[in-house]
Image: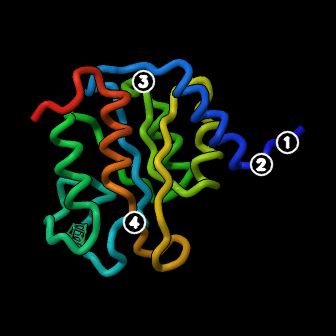
Amino acid sequence: VALAGSAFVWLNDVRNRIRPRRFAANRVLLLLPHCLQRQDCPHPVKDNIANCQECGRCKMKEIKQLAARFGVKVHVASGGREAVDRATAKDVDVVLAVACNKELAEGIQALFPKRVVGVLNQWPNGPCKDTDVDMTALERALESVVKGGRKA
Ligand code: SF4
């Protein structure tokens, strides 16, 4: 029986709650969709989030700072396939993925049994354009997976 995307996301959430696990910060990958970046921003955060100039017009600034406080790896993905390729790598034990319901469901299935913790992004400007994320939810999710929590 094919499960709808939201059912996968829900089941995955249940798995994380029933069997919570924490990992060393350097084994955690924070995976971000490219649509979180302002569309008119010229800085290549897909190459490296360090390229964000922290102007504050989108959440990349706060996410870059939050990831540094936790000491986790960050990857800004241009698409689902590329995101899965990065998340499959051996240096990653757990993926904290910011994504829409559809991409999250596909990622959970593609990466299983690797652990994925999902935080849904928000669409104040419609799908895939200048999207947003709740920073409190993201910080809570990081605290739930990173051993020792924040470093600073
Ligand atoms: S915070 Fe500013 S510099 Fe950084 S990605 Fe967003 S728009 Fe670009």
Residue beneath disc 4:
132
Residue beneath disc 2:
4
Residue 125: x and y in percent read 47, 79
Residue beneath disc 1:
2
Q: Indicate the amino acid at tag 2.
A: Ala
Identify the element where label 1 is drawn. Answer: loop
Name the residue: 56% across, 52% down.
Answer: 80
| Marks 3/4: CA–CA distance | 26 Å
Residue beneath disc 3:
93
| Marks 2/1: CA–CA distance | 7 Å
Ligand 1 appears in which quadrant? bottom left
Disc 2 under 8 Å from ligand 1? The reply is no
Residue 76: x and y in percent read 37, 53
Disc number lying in front (1 or 3): 1
Q: Are marks 2 and 1 in contact (CB under 8 Å)?
A: yes
Disc number lying in front (2 or 3): 2
Identify the element where label 4 is drawn. Answer: loop
Q: Is residue 146 left or right of residue 54?
A: right
Name the residue: 31% across, 81% down.
Answer: 40
